[in-house]
Amino acid sequence: MIFDLKPKKDKEIQRVSNKALRELKEFYGIKNKIEINIIMLKDRKTFNALRNRKTPGWNTAFARPPIFSVFILDKKNFGKESSSDYSKEYYAQLIKHEISHVLFYQMMGDLRCPAWFAEGVALYTDGSLKRRKRPGKFEDFLEFYQSGKSGVYRESGFAVEVLVKKFGKGKLHELIKRNNGIRGRKQFDKLFRKIYGFNINYRNMNKLLQE
Ligand SMILES: [Zn+2]
């Protein structure tokens, strides 16, 4: 497939992505200069062509961390080409979510990690948790080890929130960095235990949620 890209100016998107990048660099403790490309895809057809598959209506953006790039449905066609309504706030949150993925994988230096962990950190940092329903207890986020299913968004952000609130950002940074080279759930769970001192399971995570 052949695509045609042209640079363009958009003050609002530039402002939103600069602000997100500033806040996220602070969260991840990243000091070096980073520039992010925001690539607007004009419609679902272009979005699908670039992803090489048919995508569901809720899927409106994705990140390609190795090339510091965020791809997003153009705001002009956003309502028409997705199952979400366009608002400035929601669009800004989507951009921040994807930039967070870029910095997360840059910090890790690897592209493989549990889906719940990658999405959880992005949801925790994109500011969307206040609009999401807080789970009374954790019951399925650990099942989302491979990516792609929308259920991963339900609990994972709150699981990361609990970890940061109880143990701080330092341990989370450590888990991100040391996940480099980790392959499979067993290895990840072992690394988690080494860093946090307990096994990652629903019983332990629910205890933290209720404390
Ligand atoms: Zn995400």
Image (spheres, rainbow, N blue to C red):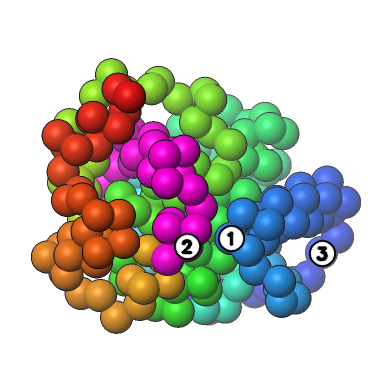
For label 1, the SS is: helix
Which residue sits at x=42%, y=46%? 167
Q: Are marks 2 and 1 in contact (CB under 8 Å)?
A: yes
Instruction: Say what amino acid the circle numbered 3 marks.
Output: Lys
Residue bearing mark 3: 8
Instruction: Say what amino acid the circle numbered 2 marks.
Output: His
Residue 173 image label? 2
Q: Residues within 10 Å of mark 3 (few under 14, many from 20)?
A: few
Q: Nearer the viewer, mark 2 or mark 3?
A: 2
Please state which of residues 12 and 66 is positioned toward the viewer in this rendering.
66
Q: Residues within 10 Å of mark 2 (few under 14, many from 20)?
A: some
Which residue sits at x=17%, y=65%? 190
Q: Who comes first in sequence, dot 2 or dot 3? A: 3
Q: Who comes first in sequence, dot 3 or dot 1? A: 3
Residue 2 image label? none
**How far across and down, in percent of the image, does residue 36 sit?**
68, 68
| Marks 3/1: CA–CA distance | 29 Å
Above or below for 57 versus 139: below
Residue bearing mark 1: 28
**How far across and down, in percent of the image, does residue 67 sit?**
57, 78
Please state which of residues 71 and 178 is positioned toward the viewer in this rendering.
178
Q: Residues within 10 Å of mark 1 (few under 14, many from 20)?
A: some
Q: Who comes first in sequence, dot 2 or dot 1? A: 1
Q: Residue 71, can we see it?
A: no
Q: Give the overall secondary structure of the magenta segment.
A: helix
**Stretch in magenta:** 146-174
- In reply to whether residue 132 is colored magenta, the answer given is no
